[in-house]
Amino acid sequence: MASVTLSEAEKVYIVHGVQEDLRVDGRGCEDYRCVEVETDVVSNTSGSARVKLGHTDILVGVKAEMGTPKLEKPNEGYLEFFVDCSASATPEFEGRGGDDLGTEIANTLYRIFNNKSSVDLKTLCISPREHCWVLYVDVLLLECGGNLFDAISIAVKAALFNTRIPRVRVLEDEEGSKDIELSDDPYDCIRLSVENVPCIVTLCKEEACSLASLLVSVTSKGVVTCMRKVGKGSLDPESIFEMMETGKRVGKVLHASLQSVVHKEESLGPKRQKVGFLG
Amino acid sequence: MAGLELLSDQGYRVDGRRAGELRKIQARMGVFAQADGSAYIEQGNTKALAVVYGPHEIRGSRARALPDRALVNCQYSSATFSTGERKRRPHGDRKSCEMGLQLRQTFEAAILTQLHPRSQIDIYVQADGGTYAACVNAATLAVLDAGIPMRDFVCACSAGFVDGTALADLSHVEEAAGGPQLALALLPASGQIALLEMDARLHEDHLERVLEAAAQAARDVHTLLDRVVRQHVREASILLGD
């Protein structure tokens, strides 16, 4: 996504700076750029969030629909991810150009959510083997300014926090056929507990001039759920351990600040001024 | 939706508007820093985002370059979570392709393509439960934000016809009720029509009235967009310290 080509001298300059814990825009090695998070921006969805991290802009919508549980997990609902790289990010994404990146990101999201502790899928079950909630998480990439995975994971976590799933009751008739009744009150709903949803932290030696980077997905307690190396270069094993420790540290801080922001937004209640893209 | 009254006896519509009244429009230009031009518009509950890249060298086959004019390229995509039922494919399906072609036709009429020969202008519209009108309005603002010379604003509005009265700016409920719908894109200063499209049957005697209602609504939209652009320019010049 880096559309600026750097000369060799510029790369050396950047690497020297990083060794002194000083990056090109004045940040320290472990600092994030300013992040803006806003939830409940799309009215048609069960939950949504918009994240702006520097020049990267992501919109996530979660829709809850009824479906049948998977055969090997009859007591649980499941999540489906879909990532759309919009052509507005760069002209190369027009038509099918963005599909490759989209599939890669979606697969990464599947992997990090694939363990038992991220989201409690049993709360999504309505009646075992017959009905369950399926959460379709749709990610829309509006602008690419670097550090995609981090922004996407923050947005997914905020959107899941914002998701409101209506409460259902299963009524049994005399013949045994089940009827599903949706509760009438629009505010009566279950919320997902997102304490354990992980966030991805991308670590590398300055994105424009590094050949390889490491994605580490960390939960708020500092537990690593998934790790992946991307890029053309190769990494030293010691640097990998170092990166993981940094990732855990940074991840904890990120989680804490995200929780506080989202809770603060929540506490403002329905009278909150929705800014969306107009601010 | 039988039994849903689109126009009550007192002349009020489902959402409380009068027959010729527009929905609330809020717009902002310069939403994205990386693109050449971008704009966001909210018309009632419909949200559209437009991004413009260009003019730049033709990507892909050089053979498509036109020697005397620029090539305008449009893509329309709508978010999968936008409509009531989740949509599977955001773009590439027939409706999106058709919208893209219509947008292209509209903007080729408005952009002064002779000034940029052998180049390409990309307009990407991202709509949320989109209708053609919101997309065109957003794209106009984005093209203006990119500084591409245009003959005039392109303002669009939809219109319908119920019980002998022409309604302007249809909402989703009114569209779904299935009466005749007209989509109009207008160049307000000259009064010329860039695109006119209608589905369903309408007696030709009524066409004049519906067209006039749509044109009037488009002129109202023009006043609003003009205000937005002037506000944006004022803010930008304050920032530059002029």
Image (tube, coloured by chain):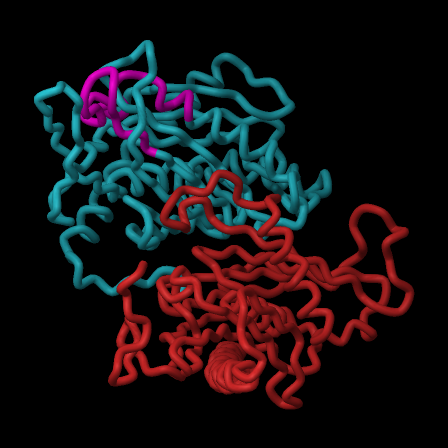
**Residue appearing at x 46%, y 38% in the figure:** A21
**Residue appearing at x 10%, y 28% in the figure:** A171
> To which quarter of the image does residue A193 belong?
top left
- Residue B54 versus residue A39 in the image, above or below: below
Residue B227 visible in the picture: no
In the image, residue B171 lies at what x, y percent?
A: 39, 67
- Residue A268 versus residue B105 in the image, above or below: above
- Residue B171 versus residue A229 in the image, above or below: below
Give B13 or A108, whichever is nearer the viewer: B13
Per the rendering, the colour in which chain A appears is: cyan
Per the rendering, the colour in which chain B appears is: red
In the image, residue A129 lies at what x, y percent?
A: 25, 15
Say whether residue A111 is magenta. yes
> To which quarter of the image does residue B38 belong?
bottom right
Q: Which residues are magenta?
A: A110-135
Total tally of numbered discs in the picture:
0
In the image, residue A38 lies at what x, y percent?
A: 31, 52
Give B225 or B174, whichever is nearer the viewer: B174
User: Farthest top residue?
Assistant: A72
- Viewed as shown, does residue A76 lie left or right of A154? left
**Residue appearing at x 51%, y 81% in the figure:** B210
